Image (tube, rainbow, N blue to C red):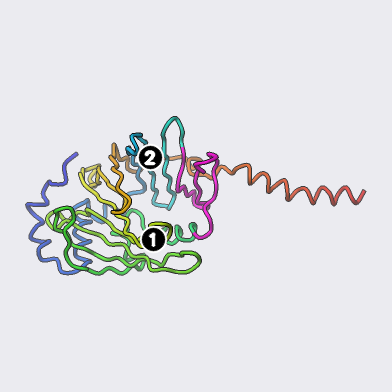
Amino acid sequence: MKKVTFILSLALVPLFSTAQTAEDIIAKCVEVTGGEENWNKLEGQKMKAKMTTNGMEIGMEMLQMKDGRTATVIRFQGMELKQNVYDGETLWNTNFMNMKPEKADSETFENFKRTLGEYPSPLITYKKMGYEVKLEGDENVDGVEAYKVKMIKKPLLVDGKEEKNITYYFFDKETGVLIMTAQEISSGKMKGKMAKTFFSDYDEVDGLYFPFSMKMGADDAGYQEITIESYELNPQVEDSFFAYPGDDKDEEEKVKEEEPKKKKKKSRK
C-alpha cells in the first residue's frame, strides 16, 4: 500500500489552485483517490475497525454493497450485535437491551431509502441523485486549509415533516482528499449541533485510496477515534448475512392472527 502523499503534492497542486467550482473540487478528489471509472466498478466493500470508548475496545465490521445492502457488526465482551442492516427489503437492528432483532420504524426506513443510490459515495453519485453542490469558500480544519463544499440532498423526515438535508464536505487544498464532513443533527438532545467526521491516513487498496483513521462526534459531546484495520473490496457475502431473522414478537403476532380463525372453526361444530 502507498501513502496518499504519493504524487499529489507534485502533480496536482497546480490543478487545485485553479479550481473554481464545487464540481471541480469534487472531481479532483475522485480523481486522486482512484478515478470515477474504478470507483464505479466497486461492487462492495468490507471494513474492519476497532474503537476504544470508556476504556473498552470495540470491534466493528462494516459492509456496503452496490445493490444497497448494508450491515454494521459490533463485537464486545463476547457479544455480537448487528446495526443498520438492510437486506434489500427490511432495515433492522439488534436491540441492545434484549439482544433481539427489530425492524426500524417507518420514518427511519423512509429516510434510509432516500439515500439508496449514493454508493460508493455521494461525491461520485451526487449528480445522478439530483443533489446540488456549492462552493462555500475556505476553512481551516485542524490546521489544514480546506475548501468547504455544501451538498443539498433529498429532504429528511423529522417527526413526519420534511427538513433540509445538508452535508458540508471539506477538502484538503494541497492534496485534494476529503478530510471532514459536517451535518446538523436534526433530532434529540443534540439537535442543532454539528455532527462531524474527520478522515486521515489515506492508503491504497487495489488502486483505490481509503482513510485508515476516522474521528466521529460533535464539539459538545466529544469524539471517538476509529482505527481501520483493513478493507476488503468486492467481498463475497451470503444473502443470509443481511436477512432479517424475525423475532418472538413476530411469532406472537402470527399466533394472534391464527386464534380468531381457530375459534371460528370451533363455533361451527
Magenta residue span: 81-107
In the rendering, which numbered label is found on residue 61?
2
The residue labelled by disc 1 is 191
- Nearest to the observer: residue 126 or residue 146: 146
> Mark 1 or mark 2, which has the lower sequence index?
2
Secondary structure state at the residue bearing disc 1: loop
What is the x, y in percent for residue 63?
39, 44
Q: Residue at x 49, y 43 (%)?
A: 239
Q: Nearer the viewer, mark 1 or mark 2?
A: 1
Q: Is residue 145 left or right of residue 258?
A: left
Alpha-carbon span between mark 1 and mark 2? 28 Å
Between 190 and 233, which is closer to the camera in this rendering?
A: 190
Percent across and percent down for residue 37 are: 26, 55
Above or below — where is 27 with respect to 264?
below
Looking at the rendering, which quadrant does residue 119 occupy? bottom left
Given the image, on which type of amino acid does mark 2 rest? Glu
Identify the residue at image location x=21%, y=68%: 135
SS assignment at label 2 = strand
Q: Residues within 10 Å of mark 2 (few under 14, many from 20)?
A: some
Q: Residue at x 31, y 62 (%)?
A: 167
**Image position, residue 50 (x, y; %):** 32, 37
Label pair 1/2, CB-CB below 8 angstroms: no
> In which quadrant of the rendered image does the N terminus lie?
top left
